[in-house]
Image (spheres, rainbow, N blue to C red):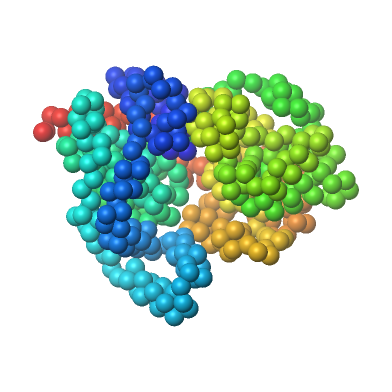
Amino acid sequence: MALRSFHSRAFREALASNDFEPVYFLGPHYYKLCNPEASEYVELKINEYDNAVSKRRHINSLSHRLRRFGVITETTDLRFRDSIEEGLFGASVFRAWSSAAFFDILRHLPGIERLAFWLENSFDHVGVHCEMLRDSGVNCALTPSMGLHTFEYEGLFAKEAQKIGLPVFAAITNYDNIVNRGFRGFTPKCVAVWSKLMADDTMRLQKLPASKIEITGPAQFDHYFRPPERDREMFLSQIGLDPAKKTVLFAGGVNITRYFEIYRLFVDPGSSGLRSDCNLAIRPYPHPKLLSSPSWQVLEELFQRAEGVFISLPPANEADDVVDASMWRDLSGEDDLDHLHCLLLYSDVMLNIFSTISLEAAICDLPTIHMGYDLYTYGHRYNMTTSFQQRQTHNRRPLRLAAAKIAHDEAELVQAIKQYLRDRSLDKDKRLDYALSECEFLDGKSSQRLVDMVSCRLANWERMK
């Protein structure tokens, strides 16, 4: 999502309007999918980052864990418990539990996340791209996130840019990053957040002053405010669905068992009475954990044999495997964005399990039902259950809960589906309230505000230096 945000048409147009020429530093997997002759793409040397960090692996491991879990929210607490489970069978019981107990006390100490930030930045002197940045004539850097968990490479790159005197800006690219991904890895000149809600969370959890925060809206959702290229009848006909019928969209996660539940509910004859009433569109989670599994390959074939079922997959014709196909979607322009826009706009109800796409559905005024139950949990870790999802900080916000129905069993799910198929306008105002609370702006101009922020603050920095 981060790359797609900075690679979209709206963002590129905003760059051009401010006379910026972008240079994209991409990880090896993305870089190999690009045109090697395109000067705007440079490979990010993550292997060299790994080698440099490994020389201080004990300090970096401790500081990273403290940054990740030192911001105390319900989500980071769940993730900490999950990390205990991961390491439980690799050490003795005494060592595993005593280590976990000690670290739990440590992470709750006041200011520990800022101590970890200082410790990490005192010893981080990586210089992998410094010479390249100097020679390229780059004036500033913009990174997704602020070096939060899973954005470590972006954080190292930002610190390299700061090391040679470049101003670095950041943009939050997912609505749950501030509360879910620990403490920041660097301090930007300014971070672009989506809303007042996110700005408040940034000040409270990331310890940034208001002067370093600007509300710009979600740049990655700008395309939802452009008219789609196809109307409903054309789109549904093109994907093999009947425009005369209403459409249920299932946007699943990585848990394959939920897709089998959907197959039984909608495709097996006589199971729920839904089969003949509606189309079924399936948007699989674009991750190899799901798409590379033998179970998915079997299930995909079963879905494809069924009439009135469409599977929305990444454009695999441009890639060699599932991972490349998913990554290509981030680089391939607007086709998939328009496809997803049409799915959200022309479906009549979406089934989901508490993921980001439910916010996108609210933006497109698509009713959402969360499957708040687990029919099958044998062999599953707790982090695969809906209980885990429902306990996360961002999923407990009142407006988010009010904007969608939560089905606590299959009977409630079928009943809620039928209600929304009868009247798609149910809960319309609640969806709008939720979208506004998370996004602040619903006008398709967030990319422009983001680039304007960078341009204005860069000009101020150049005047003052």
User: How many numbered marks does the figure carry?
Assistant: 0
Please state which of residues 210 and 155 is positioned toward the viewer in this rendering. 155
239 lies left or right of 35: right
Q: Residue at x 65, y 64 (%)?
A: 379
Foreground residue, 218 or 301?
A: 301
- Residue 120 drawn at (x, y percent): 25, 56
Q: Which residue shows up at 56% across the image and 58% down it? A: 389
The quadrant holding residue 228 is: top right
Q: Residue 298 sits in which quadrant?
A: top right
On screen, residue 135 above or below 290: above
Q: Residue at x 74, y 52 (%)?
A: 261
Q: Residue furthest bottom?
A: 94
Furthest-left residue in this view: 465
Q: Residue, x 39% and y 74% (percent of image)?
A: 99
Question: Quadrant location of residue 464?
Answer: top left
Query: Quick one: quadrant of the C terminus?
Result: top left
Reply above or below: 200 against 457. Answer: below
Q: Is residue 235 left or right of residue 191?
A: right
User: Is any part of residue 231 visible from this angle?
Assistant: yes
Q: Picture coordinates of residue 160 (x, y %)?
A: 23, 41
Answer whether residue 114 is visible to the viewer in this image: no
Of residues 61 and 196, the one drawn nearer to the viewer in this rendering: 61
Front residue of 46/378: it is: 46
**Image location (x, y in percent) of residue 31:** 42, 31
Is the residue 116 above or below the residue 100 in the image?
A: above
